[in-house]
Every structure is written in structure tokens, then in C-alpha cells.
Image: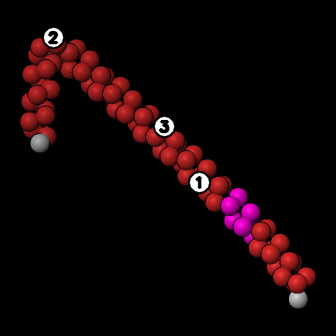
Amino acid sequence: MVRGQRQANRSLKHIRRDAKQVGDAFRGMAAAAGLFSGAALFRDLIRAQVQMQQITYTMQAATGSAQQAAQAFEFVRKESA
């Protein structure tokens, strides 16, 4: 009876250790996913900024000045709302 109890206790210790390792692995994967998600968001924000800058330069080239480009851009904003 005592020997069976010891064996059961050892098995439970192994199960606890394995469960902890699985939990640690999941926490690590969650952290990695969070970093990846944050990096993807940052990349998308940079792309959006580059695209906006390209639009601004295009408007300046089309209108001939930064002031006229700003007016044209404001018109586009109002019309798209």
C-alpha cells in the first residue's frame, strides 16, 4: 500500500512538472505572438506613413506648391467624409 502511494506521488510530481513545462511553453508562445503582432502593427504604420508622404509629394507636384497641395488635400478629406 505504501509503495503504491509513493509511486502515485512520483507520478503526480511528473505530471505537475510536465504541466508546468507546457504552461511555460504556452506563455512563451503568447509573448512571441504579442511581439510579432506589435512588429506587424509597427510595420503597417510605417507603410501608411510612407504612402501618405507619397500622396503629399504627388499633390505638390500636381498643384505646383505645398500650399495648393494642402488645399487640395483638405478638399479630398472633406469629400471623402
The part of the chain drawn in magenta is: 15-21
Query: Whole-percent x and y of residue 52?
Result: 28, 27
Query: Whole-percent x and y of residue 42?
Result: 42, 34
Report how far apart the C-alphas of labels 2 and 1 lie in the structure.
53 Å
Tell me the SS state at disc 1. helix
Which residue bears the numbered disc 1?
27
Look at the picture and state if 65 lies above or below 28.
above
As for residue 20 lying within the magenta part, the answer is yes
Q: Quadrant of residue 14?
A: bottom right
Which residue bears the numbered disc 2?
65
Marks 2 and 3: which is nearer the front? 3
As for residue 54 lying within the magenta part, the answer is no
Which residue bears the numbered disc 3?
39
Query: Whole-percent x and y of residue 80?
Result: 13, 40
Report how far apart the C-alphas of labels 1 and 3 lie in the structure.
18 Å
Q: Which amino acid does label 2 sit on?
A: Ser
Q: Quadrant of residue 17?
A: bottom right
Marks 2 and 1: which is nearer the front? 1
Q: Residue at x 11, y 42 (%)?
A: 81
Q: Which residue is drawn at 15% across and 26% down?
A: 73
